[in-house]
Image (tube, rainbow, N blue to C red):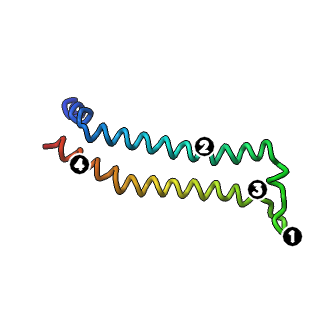
Amino acid sequence: MDTELVTRIANNPNYQALKAQRTRFGWWLTLAMMIAYYGFILLVAFNKSFLSQKLGAGVMTVGIPIGFGVIVFTILITAYYVNRANREFDALSDTIAKEVLK
């Protein structure tokens, strides 16, 4: 890759904004996922009696829907990231490419 092009991209204010927005957003989603995942793991480790409570007369316990919820939460925040990336980050990337390739 051309070093002049890399320098122009790195010095572009829109690139700096994109990098900052994407990083900040990624850390917030990482924090949310870690809270959900490690919260579940901590429940498994320290509150087994809560998770092992039966729901109704069947064999399902409280832990099963909570574990399923962690999986669904992961899918939802991934979809949210993809949606925002397609909406905002891609538009900003296109703007940067047009400005830099002038």
Amino acid type, residue under disc 1 in the picture = Ala
Q: Earlier in the sequence, mark 4 or mark 1?
A: 1
Q: Earlier in the sequence, mark 3 or mark 2?
A: 2
Q: Earlier in the sequence, mark 2 or mark 1?
A: 2
Indicate the secondary structure of the residue bearing disc 2.
helix
Specify whether 12 is left or right of 64.
left
Which residue was labeled with disc 1? 57
Image quadrant occupied by the N terminus: top left
What residue appears at the point 84 percent right and 65 percent down from the top-left corner? 59
Q: Where's residue 7, x and y in %?
A: 23, 30
Label 4 Cα crowd, 10 Å radius (few <14 / some 14-19 / many 20+): few
Image quadrant occupied by the C terminus: top left
Q: Earlier in the sequence, mark 4 or mark 2?
A: 2
Give the quarter of the image for residue 15: top left
Specify whether 8 is left or right of 45.
left
Q: Which mark is residue 63?
A: 3
Give the quarter of the image for residue 75: bottom right
Q: Which mark is residue 34?
A: 2
Label 2 Cα crowd, 10 Å radius (few <14 / some 14-19 / many 20+): few
Asked if marks 4 and 1 touch (Cβ < 8 Å), the reply is no
Indicate the secondary structure of the residue bearing disc 1.
loop
Q: Which mark is residue 95?
A: 4
Indicate the secondary structure of the residue bearing disc 3.
helix
Amino acid type, residue under disc 2 in the picture = Met
Toward the left, the furthest residue is 102
What residue appears at the point 35 percent right and 39 percent down from the top-left corner? 19
Q: CA distance from mark 2 to mark 1?
A: 33 Å
Say how many tags the image has: 4
Asked if marks 3 and 1 touch (Cβ < 8 Å), the reply is no
Q: CA distance from mark 4 to mark 3?
A: 47 Å
Q: Where's residue 78, x and y in %?
A: 50, 54
Amino acid type, residue under disc 3 in the picture = Gly
